[in-house]
């Protein structure tokens, strides 16, 4: 049969809505950083008579340092992913615990009875790869009273007496706190918090070509060290002691000054890629805090620079290799 309507180049019906450049739906809100908080063993490090009687440590490998203890109370040396490996625990130079076959992801449990006491001592030394020196002449200086060198692939000295904060999820190099029991019978099963979830600027540290264009830092005035970079890639020295107003110098990996700011405690400042001569962040930067009045300086011996010319210094990686 012949068609009832002759073909036409015109549409049968006009469009119901005229085209527009506006999106049909508004985009959802940009993702934000969500932070949760760790399960506290020693909530604030106030020495409030809570005592640890059992501590579970998981061999995670690597050299990540993430905790809230004062930086001069902790020493982390080395990094290893060897599996299995020997793990030993010392107090006052005495080997109180040893497990000769610990695999990555495996957990060991240390008891107060290992120290011959009812509760944990003030600090302990954990050696991963015990008696397998890191190949450094004379071992690795630790600067602690527990031992002059790290006789292993990785070592961590940290406080366990609750004079310093301690939490499930804290990372001390190759070992992570994964459980506990205290002398009141409380343990990690009663915790309502979770291990901190970071908002990543460099998500994996894999050098995946992510590049920073700006970095905002807050002057907190303290000396807490908490990060996930390898321990030997970060240097933190000194203590601002809550100085109310300070001057801050930002330098690149070669020590060239890229920014100078004055900031009050709780205030923030932003470093931009354009501040650097190359137009991008260098592999690492150093932040030097100096007292505003007279710009007080003091030698410190940071390994990534000749010295720390201030009351506090922090050098860390910004290239996303960490």
Image (spheres, helix red, strand yellow):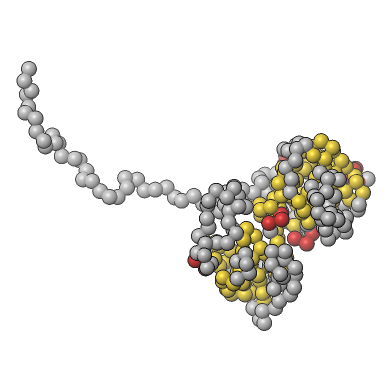
Residue 51 screen position, x and y as percent: 83, 50
- The image quarter containing residue 130 is top right
Q: Residue at x 75, y 57 (%)?
A: 69
Q: Residue at x 6, y 28 (%)?
A: 6
Q: Residue at x 39, y 48 (%)?
A: 27
- The image quarter containing residue 296 is bottom right
Q: Residue at x 69, y 64 (%)?
A: 304
- Residue 210 visible in the snapshot: yes
Asked if residue 161 is positioned above or below residue 256 in the image, the reply reads: above
Nearest the camera: 273 or 47? 273
Asked if residue 118 is positioned above or below residue 74 in the image, the reply reads: above
Count up the numbered dots. 0
- Residue 52 visible in the snapshot: no
Residue 149 screen position, x and y as percent: 85, 55
In this view, the residue farthest toward the top is: 1
Look at the image and tell me in which quarter the N terminus lies: top left
């Amino acid at each position: 049969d012949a068609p009832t309507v002759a073909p036409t180049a015109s549409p049968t019906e006009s469009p119901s809505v005229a085209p527009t450049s506006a999106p049909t739906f508004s985009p959802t809100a940009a993702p934000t950083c969500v932070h949760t908080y760790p399960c506290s063993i020693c909530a604030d490090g106030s020495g409030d008579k809570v005592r640890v009687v059992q501590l579970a440590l998981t061999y995670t490998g690597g050299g990540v340092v993430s905790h809230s203890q004062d930086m001069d109370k902790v020493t982390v040396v080395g990094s290893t992913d060897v599996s299995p490996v020997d793990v030993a625990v010392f107090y006052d130079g005495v080997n109180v615990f040893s497990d000769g076959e610990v695999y990555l992801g495996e957990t060991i449990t240390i008891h107060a009875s290992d120290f011959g006491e009812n509760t944990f001592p003030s600090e302990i030394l954990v050696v991963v790869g015990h008696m397998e020196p890191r190949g450094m002449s004379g071992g690795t200086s630790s600067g602690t009273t527990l031992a002059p060198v790290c006789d292993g692939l990785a070592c961590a000295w940290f406080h366990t007496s609750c004079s310093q904060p301690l939490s499930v999820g804290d990372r001390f190099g190759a070992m992570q706190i994964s459980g506990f029991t205290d002398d009141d019978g409380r343990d990690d099963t009663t915790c309502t918090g979770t291990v901190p979830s970071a908002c990543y600027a460099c998500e994996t540290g894999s050098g995946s070509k992510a590049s920073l264009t700006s970095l905002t830092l807050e002057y907190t005035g303290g000396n807490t060290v908490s990060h996930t970079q390898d321990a030997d890639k970060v240097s933190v020295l000194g203590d601002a002691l809550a100085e109310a107003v300070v001057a801050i110098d930002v330098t690149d990996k070669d020590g060239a000054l890229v920014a100078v700011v004055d900031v009050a405690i709780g205030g923030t400042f932003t470093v931009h890629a354009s501040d650097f001569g190359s137009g991008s962040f260098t592999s690492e930067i150093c932040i030097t805090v100096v007292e505003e009045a007279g710009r007080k300086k003091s030698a410190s011996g940071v390994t990534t620079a000749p010295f720390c010319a201030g009351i506090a210094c922090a050098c860390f990686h910004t290239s996303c290799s960490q």
